Image: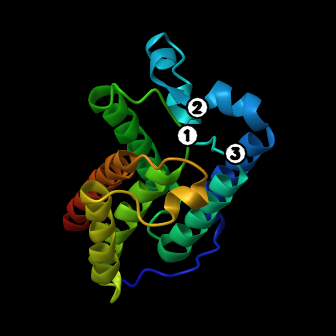
Amino acid sequence: MRTRRFDIAPDASILPITIAALILLAAIGGDTVRLAGRYEREAVLDGELWRLVTGHLVHLGWSHTVLNLAGLALVWALFASALRGMHGLWVLVASIAAIDAGFLINEPQLDWYVGFSGVLHGLFAAGVIASIRAREPEAWLLGALFVVKLGWEQLIGPVPLTAKMAGGAVIENAHLYGALGGACAGLLALRLRLRSARL
């Protein structure tokens, strides 16, 4: 069955609208909300666990916020049907969990982090997997470009101009961890759907 684009059904749009609203509210809160919500390793280890979630909702400033909101709109334009309902929520949670685990286990030198771009990479990865399963003609191209981008970031560094547009340093590993979390969630969902289809 072909995945529909630009799906505006309520269960396809409620998640991105909720995410966008939370990101905008955090941006309106300015530095106070940013400092209280950003991922800070020492604060998390001291018990401020909300930062594991809120760190992905706060941003460096308005340019960073707008950049991530544009990314959210693009991901939903491409993969709305694949990320609708509980599946989108599951991918969101898996992506956030993968990024946070990656930071805590592999990035002890990372003192703090803000932004939604890592989660966007997780949503994109899951969307590509669903599109490949649905035999979307552009799915393999999108997947290949996505892998090239991740490879570039790991081997060379940030994609040109992204740091300037975001207004600060890009944490490339957040994109990798998010993509791995989203891909795992997408593959698990695919396996469960295939199993239920056989029953």
Residue type of the residue flagged with mark 1: Val
Q: Nearer the viewer, mark 1 or mark 3?
A: 1
> Within 10 Å of the Cα at label 2, are there few (<14), some (14-19), or many (20+) other Cα atoms?
many
Residue type of the residue flagged with mark 3: Leu
Left or right: residue 58 compared with residue 162: right
> Within 10 Å of the Cα at label 3, are there few (<14), some (14-19), or many (20+) other Cα atoms?
some
Question: Can residue 145 be seen here?
Answer: yes
128 in relation to 67, above or below:
below
Residue 38: which disc?
Answer: 2
- For the C terminus, which image quadrant? bottom left
Left or right: residue 100 compared with residue 10: left
Q: Position of residue 120 (x, y in %)?
A: 48, 57
Kind of element beneath mark 2: loop
Q: Position of residue 121 (x, y in %)?
A: 41, 58
Q: Which residue is disc 1 drawn over? A: 114
For the residues bearing labels 2 and 1, Cβ distance under 8 angstroms: yes
- For the N terminus, which image quadrant? bottom left
N-terminal label among 1 and 3: 3
Residue at 56% x, 25% y: name it.
50
Q: Which residue is disc 3 drawn over? A: 22
Residue at 58% x, 31% y: name it.
38
1 in relation to 171, above or below:
below
**What is the spatial separation of the Cα atoms under label 1 and label 3, in whole angstroms?**
14 Å
For the residues bearing labels 2 and 3, Cβ distance under 8 angstroms: no
N-terminal label among 2 and 3: 3
